[in-house]
Amino acid sequence: MLTEKRHQFILDLLTENDIVTINELLKPLNASESTVRRDLKNLEEQGLLARVHGGAKKMPHLSFEATMAEKEEKFHQQKVQIAKFCAGLLDTEDVIYLDAGSTTIEMIQFIPNDLSIKVVTNSVKHAALLIDRQIETIILGGNIKLSTNATLGATAMQQLSDFRFSKSFLGMNGVELEAGFTTPDPEEAAVKRQALQQSQQAYVLLDHSKLQQVTFVQVAPLKSATIVTNSCPQKFREDFQDQTTLKEVN
C-alpha cells in the first residue's frame, strides 16, 4: 500500500475510534511494525495525531467544549449506568457537591426518596431538578455559562470556599495518565478543583470516550479522585489502576 493511502487509512480509523494501536494497523495496512511506527511519527509531525504508548490517538481540540444539549445526546445510556452506580454510593446525612455535567445530572433521578442528604451544585439545571425532588439544595452564585448552565467566577469560588463535603461527584472533559483530569475552561477548572479539594471522597464520572483525552486546563492529578466509567480498555486499565482507583460499571 502506498504511503499516502496508509496515512489516510490511519486517519480514517482514528475518526471512528479515537485511538488505534499498532497491532490493529499491521494486518489491514499489510506493513511491518517499523513502517507503521514511521507512519505514525510522520503524521504526528504534521499535527494530525498524537502518538501514545503502543499506538496513536486523535489530535485533541484543547479548547473545544460542546453545549450541555450536545453532551446529553452522546453515550446517554452509558452515562445513566455510571450515574445510577454513583447514586448508590450515597448515605443518609451526606453533604455532597454535584458538579454541572451531562453525567452528574443523571444521578438526580436515582437518589432514593428516603435518603436525607444536602446537595451543593453549581448548575442551574441540576438545582431545578433537585428542587423538584424536594432535596435540600444550595446553588452557588456567580456568572452563568450559557453553554453548560454552570455558575462560575469569584462569587461562586468565595461561596464554595466555606463548604466541606462528605462526597463530591464531578464531570470532566478528559482524563489522561500524565495530564490527569482536564477541562477546557479555566474558570470551570477552578471550581471543580476547589470542590474536589474540599471533599472527603471525590468521584469523577466519565464515559469511555473521555479516557486518554486531554483538554486545556488541568483540574487535578489522577490520584485526587476515583474514576467511575462504563468501560476502560484493557490497554489502559493497568496504567490507570497504578495511579488511582478505577471503578467500571457494566
Image: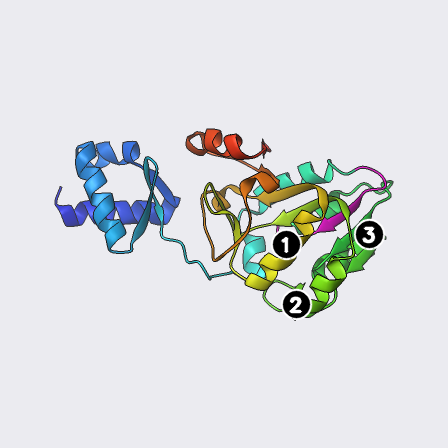
Identified at 66% across, 65% down, the residue is: 152
Mark 1 neighbour class, 10 Å CA radius: few under 14, some 14 to 19, many 20 or more: many
User: Which x, y percent locates residue 203?
Assistant: 65, 42
Q: Which residue is mark 1?
A: 192
- Magenta segment, principal secondary structure? loop
Identified at 41% across, 58% down, the residue is: 61
User: Which x, y percent locates residue 207?
Assistant: 54, 43
Choose top left, top right, bottom left or bottom right for residue 47.
bottom left
Whether residue 16 appears in magenta in the rendering, the answer is: no
Specify which label sits upstream in the sequence, 2 or 3.
3
Give the foreground label among 2 and 3: 2
Q: Mark 3 and 1 residues: CB-CB less than 8 Å, in contact?
A: no
**Extreme bottom residue here?**
143
Q: Amino acid at mark 3?
A: Arg
Q: Which residue is mark 2?
A: 153
Specify which label sits upstream in the sequence, 3 or 1.
3
Q: Quadrant of the C terminus?
A: top right
